């Protein structure tokens, strides 16, 4: 089930955030960096975020949060053709490959569309195996940059959709 996040979801979102980073980026980002990620810090961050920008969660049959996505206006102002941005989307490893990512992306795209935002981009580490997910959804390479994580530099790719209505119909 996909639904808007509400107060009280922050611990579940934080668990997904930390655990998905640890599984997705193992062998990419240093173990030391991944081990220092804090459920409590992420929960505090997400508690403040709930009720702000669009934020959706995916739940399993036991009503446990297994994924989330958030988005809003494109943050840098450097991409005139892309008014919106998928800020984050994470799923627990066991929840991947079941269509939840597409549903979460669709929920964000639909809400952005309702806000009058017709296009969107997402930044993803080039080494992230989930990059192929965005490509399957039709994301086209827009730009690339390097970002520091744990004292190392990583290549990050922006993938974009000029018309997010194609994404919002998937949900």
Image (cartoon, grey):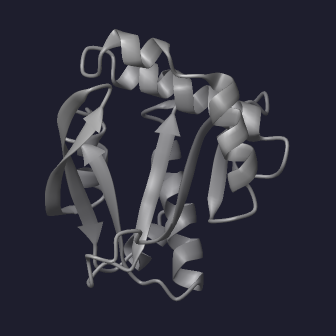
> Would residue 171 be seen by someone viewing this image from the given angle?
no
In the rendered view, does 168 fall on the left or right side of 48? left
Residue 170's x, y, as percent?
47, 63
| Residue at image point 74% right, 30% down | 64
Residue 24: % across, % down: 37, 25
36 relative to 20, above or below: above
Q: Nearer the viewer, residue 61 or 124?
A: 124
* In the displayed structure image, the side of residue 113 where residue 5 appears, left or right: right
Residue 49 spot, x, y in % from top left: 68, 54
Quarter of the view holding residue 133:
top left
Q: Nearer the viewer, residue 142 or 96?
A: 142
Q: Residue furthest bottom?
A: 116
The answer to whether residue 42 is left or right of residue 126 is right
Residue appearing at x 54%, y 64% in the figure: 108
Indicate the quadrant containing the C terminus: top left, top right, bottom left or bottom right.
bottom right
Asked if one can make out residue 161 in the rendered structure from this viewpoint, the answer is yes
**Numbered circles on residues, count:** 0
Q: Residue at x 49, y 39 (%)?
A: 90
Q: Nearer the viewer, residue 59 or 143?
A: 143
Picture coordinates of residue 150 (x, y %)? 32, 25
Quarter of image, res 81: bottom left
21 shown above or below 44: above
């Amino acid at each position: 089930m996909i639904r808007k996040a509400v107060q009280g979801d922050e611990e579940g979102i934080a668990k997904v955030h930390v655990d998905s980073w640890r599984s997705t980026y193992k062998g990419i980002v240093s173990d030391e960096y991944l081990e220092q990620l804090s459920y409590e810090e992420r929960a505090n961050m997400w508690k403040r975020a709930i009720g702000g920008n669009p934020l959706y969660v995916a739940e399993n049959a036991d009503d446990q949060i297994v994924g989330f996505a958030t988005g809003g206006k494109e943050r840098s102002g450097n991409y005139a053709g892309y008014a919106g941005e998928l800020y984050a989307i994470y799923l627990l490893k066991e929840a991947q490959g079941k269509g939840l990512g597409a549903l979460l992306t669709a929920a964000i795209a639909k809400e952005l569309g309702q806000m009058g935002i017709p296009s969107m981009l997402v930044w993803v580490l080039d080494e992230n195996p989930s990059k192929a997910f965005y490509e399957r959804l039709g994301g086209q390479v827009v730009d690339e940059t390097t970002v520091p994580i744990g004292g190392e530099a990583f290549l990050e790719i922006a993938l974009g959709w000029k018309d997010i209505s194609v994404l919002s119909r998937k949900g």
